[in-house]
């Protein structure tokens, strides 16, 4: 697959009700699958890589939480519960590291 063959598609019905920052959070996740992840299929890796981009750009942490919670709410599973726990830990660590230098 070449760089130009990679396309991010979203479901319009799910995307339109989201805030702009929630959309960006989703897009950074999808971008990570295609361009950042070592394993393109790894959802947790895409969660954390996408969050790193999102948070490093200064977008609100609360919107990141809302994005993943609303996404996982529609597909409740043990896997998504574990993913959200890892997301919370990542956001907390990111916040702690960055407040040291603020």
Image (cartoon, grey):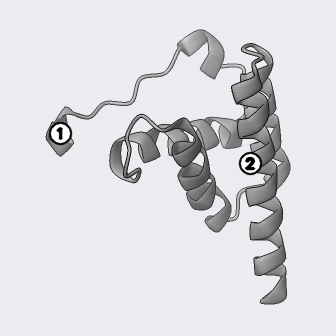
Judging depth in this view, the residue of 55 and 72 nearest the camera is: 72
Residue 1, image x and y in percent? 15, 36
Q: Which residue is drawn at 61% across and 10% down?
A: 13
Q: Quadrant of residue 18?
A: top right
Q: Earlier in the sequence, mark 1 or mark 2?
A: 1
Total marks placed: 2
Label 2 near label 1: C-beta < 8 Å? Answer: no
Residue 74, image x and y in percent? 75, 13
Pointer 1 local density, CA inside 10 Å: few below 14, some 14–19, many at least 20: few
**Label of residue 84 in the image:** none
State the CA–CA distance, disc 1 to disc 2: 32 Å
Judging depth in this view, the residue of 35 and 63 nearest the camera is: 35
**Label of residue 86 in the image:** 2
Q: In this view, does 8 lie above or below 37?
A: above
Name of the residue lying farthest toward the left:
2
Residue 42, image x and y in percent? 48, 38
Q: Which residue is drawn at 76% across and 79% down?
A: 98
- Residue named by callout 1: 4
């Amino acid at each position: 697959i070449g760089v130009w063959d990679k396309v991010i598609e979203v479901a319009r019905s799910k995307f339109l009700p989201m805030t702009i920052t929630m959309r960006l959070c989703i897009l950074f996740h999808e971008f990570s699958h295609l361009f950042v992840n070592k394993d393109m299929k790894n959802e947790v890796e895409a969660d954390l890589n996408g969050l790193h981009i999102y948070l490093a750009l200064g977008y609100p942490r609360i919107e990141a939480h809302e994005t993943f919670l609303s996404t996982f709410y529609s597909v409740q599973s043990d896997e998504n519960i574990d993913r959200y726990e890892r997301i919370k830990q990542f956001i907390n660590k990111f916040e702690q590291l960055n407040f040291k230098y603020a």
